[in-house]
Amino acid sequence: MAEIAFVGAGSIVFAKNLMVDIFSFEALQDSTVRLMDIDERRLDRTAAAGEALVAEHDLPGEVRATTDRREALDGADYVFNMVNVGGEEPFENEIRIPEEYGVEQAVGDTLGPGGVFRMLRTAPTVLDIARDMEELCPDALLVNYTNPMAMLCWAVDEATDVEVVGLCHSVQHTTSTLARYLDVPAEELSHWVAGINHMAWYLELEREGEDCYPALREAMADPDIYEQDPVRFDVMDHFGAFVTESSHHLSEYLPYFRTDPDVIESYTPDEEVGDYTVEWMPTGRYLEHWRSYQPDLSAEFDPAEADLSLDRSSEYGSRVVHSVETGERRRMNLNVRNDTGAVANLPAASCVEVPCLVDGTGIRPCSVGDLPAQLAALNRSNVAVQEQAVEAVLERSEDALRRAVKLDPLTAAALDLETADEMVDDLLDANAAYLPALD
């Protein structure tokens, strides 16, 4: 029987989906899912959803809820981290203050000043979770879903002895998107993908042994398809590979797309063209979307109106647990420390997203070798920011924080060094209540 802790379980949609995934496997239906959140109202809603699933399918497993993190962690086999530290106010500051300076982020949760400051306010909590795990469940696997993914996993790897793996759905979703562009069934596509989280590259994309890139370039020539993913298609055209993250996200990791309002407008279609993500190109649109799916906490969870099926999603989390528990081997793209040299031309300490074999022996990264030089260069531009942000957290270094922001490709394209410092000053002042003290 697996003991699985969810820390930050107040996000009812995501937590419920993960419970569905876990209980969808017969071998995991006797698991105990321990839900933990500091917001009791949110926690109660998620617990009600989990209890309804167990009752609906008469499962031998159990769902428990607690606001005590240490209680949730004690003796756990797996710890799913999905915390959101600070909520809406700092998130909005991390978008709007840079916007005032001309740094036009699309989402601001992975890189850029938004991603760096999100790291600064989130990492202390995640490190506290990991240190509790060292004491209460030292052999457990920490499964991280919280952004900024690479920075948080890097910090946990650097500062603790906890085994951590980062999970994202970029590869699964992008493969489905590519199948749509190619007009083929997604299950018929095979791929070899590697890089970093939100910037991993389809080094190979095949169908029945045939290279799909020629057909993808033909698809790109169709305006209706191109306009669904203009940034990713342009990056493929100029650098040679399709990338795992959406156009709106990718646009903020590079210096080419977001420093001029006319350029942003040119990459934003006048009307929906089949992929809603293109509508998020304007600064702050993701913030509006994030607000729109916050639950109405005044309403009780109603099992009679809920979908209580056990239809498994494409998320990797339950599959990792199932493979480790049963020994069934799977290959999945996961975020792991690069100390095995999985990507030979990225730093050993960095967090890379690579194919991994998962079975009863654990998680083993596959060797990718060198990425094409131009793709590794784009990755390293982001890794440099991540490295400084990790140092800022672990060393409580304001100098490293400022270097992280100044090395950010989007910030560097928009601001001179002195103005970047002024922006950091404003962010430090606005979010002081959410940030650790720095030296």
Image (spheres, rainbow, N blue to C red):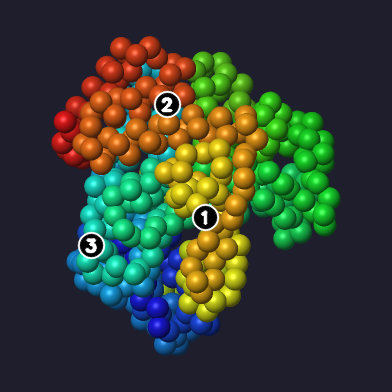
User: Under tag 1, what secondary structure?
Assistant: strand
Q: Which mark is residue 334?
A: 1
Give the amino acid type for the residue marked by disc 3 in the picture: Asp
Does the image show residue 90? no
- In the rendered image, is residue 138 in sight? yes
Of label 3 and label 2, which has the lower sequence position?
Answer: 3
**Nearer to me, 116 or 357:** 357
> Residue 298's image quarter?
bottom left
Q: Earlier in the sequence, mark 2 or mark 1?
A: 1
Of residues 213 and 305, the one nearer the viewer is 213
First in sequence: mark 1 or mark 3? 3
> Is the residue marked by circle 3 packed among few (<14), some (14-19), or many (20+) residues within 10 Å?
some
* Quarter containing the N terminus: bottom left
Q: Position of residue 45 (x, y in %)?
A: 32, 66
Picture residue at 28% right of the left edge, 58% below the top: 130
The residue lying at 53 percent from left, 34 percent from top is 379
Relative to residue 296, is residue 391 depicted above or below? above
Name the residue rendered at 48%, 48% in the picture. Answer: 338
- Mark 2 = which residue? 408
Dot 1 crowding, Cα within 10 Å, few <14, some 14–19, many 20+? many
Mark 2 secondary-structure assignment: loop
Q: CA distance from mark 1 to mark 3?
A: 24 Å
| Few, some or many residues within 10 Å of mark 2 (<14, 14–19, 20+) | many
Separation (CA) of disc 3 from disc 2: 32 Å
Q: Is residue 118 above or below residue 209?
A: above
Q: Amino acid at mark 1?
A: Leu
Q: Position of residue 153 (x, y in %)?
A: 38, 49
Q: Which residue is mark 3?
A: 132
Name the image quarter holding residue 110. Answer: top left
